[in-house]
Image (tube, helix red, strand yellow):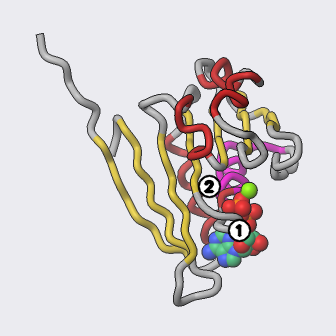
Amino acid sequence: MSISQPAIGEAEIVTLSAEETFNEGKNFASRLNGGEVIALVGELGAGKTVFTKGLCKGLDVKNPVISPTFTIANEYDADFKIYHFDAYRLSGSEDAAAIGIEDYMMGDGVCIIEWADKVKEIIPEDAMWIYFRHDEDRETGRILRIVSAGDS
Ligand SMILES: Nc1ncnc2c1ncn2[C@@H]1O[C@H](COP(=O)(O)OP(=O)(O)O)[C@@H](O)[C@H]1O
Ligand SMILES: [Mg+2]
């Protein structure tokens, strides 16, 4: 019996404006069928929420998408449920587990988690990770590195 390792796909994208990051999120939505976990990492203002807004647009969410920084979790309806978390104000994985994030991650909805590195112990192995960083040379430049297990 052989155990097959999932292929790791990796891509780096440079965006030059918030609109471009939004559009990357929108395009990314076409990869989703429900049940995925998308872990977003990057400092404040790096574009995680802008990307999520585009992703929700791509999934045809009608309600306004707002940052769950204070609410911790927002829920949207598309073909499947979208759960948008922000772990910024959580103290760590135990805190996240206490509010039941893992239950959402096991369901059929799509889970998007900003500041996922703060709760990495509870992120499933097959999650897609997207790392955002500021481009040092361009004020509105951002570099997005997408690392996804299982596809390419
Ligand atoms: N290339 C870019 N991609 C995303 N946001 C950008 C970009 N350039 C400028 N911005 C601005 O940076 C901010 C990103 O905010 P946000 O998405 O809330 O960040 P985060 O959720 O990572 O803290 C927004 O004010 C946006 O207009
Ligand atoms: Mg945010």
Residue visible at 64% across and 82% down in the picture? 140
Q: Are marks 1 and 2 in contact (CB under 8 Å)?
A: no
Position of residue 131 measured from the top left corner of the image (x, y, whole percent): 51, 58
Mark identifier at residue 100 = none
Report how far apart the C-alphas of labels 1 and 2 lie in the structure.
19 Å
Under circle 1, the secondary element is loop
Which badge, 1 or 2, is on the more N-terminal residue?
2
Position of residue 96 measured from the top left corner of the image (x, y, whole percent): 70, 30
Crowding around mark 2 (Cα neighbors within 10 Å: few <14, some 14 to 19, many 20+) is: many
Disc 2 residue type (three-letter):
Lys
Question: Looking at the picture, does residue 20 appear above or below residue 149?
Answer: below
Question: Looking at the picture, does residue 121 appear above or below residue 102?
Answer: below
Under circle 2, the secondary element is helix
Mark 1 or mark 2, whichever is nearer to me: 1
Position of residue 65 measured from the top left corner of the image (x, y, whole percent): 82, 50
User: Dividing the image into 4 quarters, which one contains the N terminus?
Assistant: top left
Residue visible at 57% across and 75% down in the picture? 134
Position of residue 49 measured from the top left corner of the image (x, y, whole percent): 72, 57
Crowding around mark 1 (Cα neighbors within 10 Å: few <14, some 14 to 19, many 20+) is: few
- The residue that label 2 is drawn on is 26
For the record, the magenta segment spans 49-62
| Residue 119 belongs to the span the image colors magenta | no
For ligand 1, tell me if the residue under mark 1 lies within 8 Å: yes
Disc 1 residue type (three-letter):
Gly
Residue visible at 61% across and 44% down in the picture? 118
Question: Looking at the picture, does residue 135 appear above or below residue 60?
Answer: below
Q: Main secondary structure of the magenta part?
A: helix
Q: Quadrant of ligand 1?
A: bottom right
Q: Quadrant of residue 15?
A: bottom right
- The residue that label 1 is drawn on is 45
Question: Looking at the picture, does residue 147 appear above or below residue 150?
Answer: below
Q: Is residue 145 visible?
A: yes
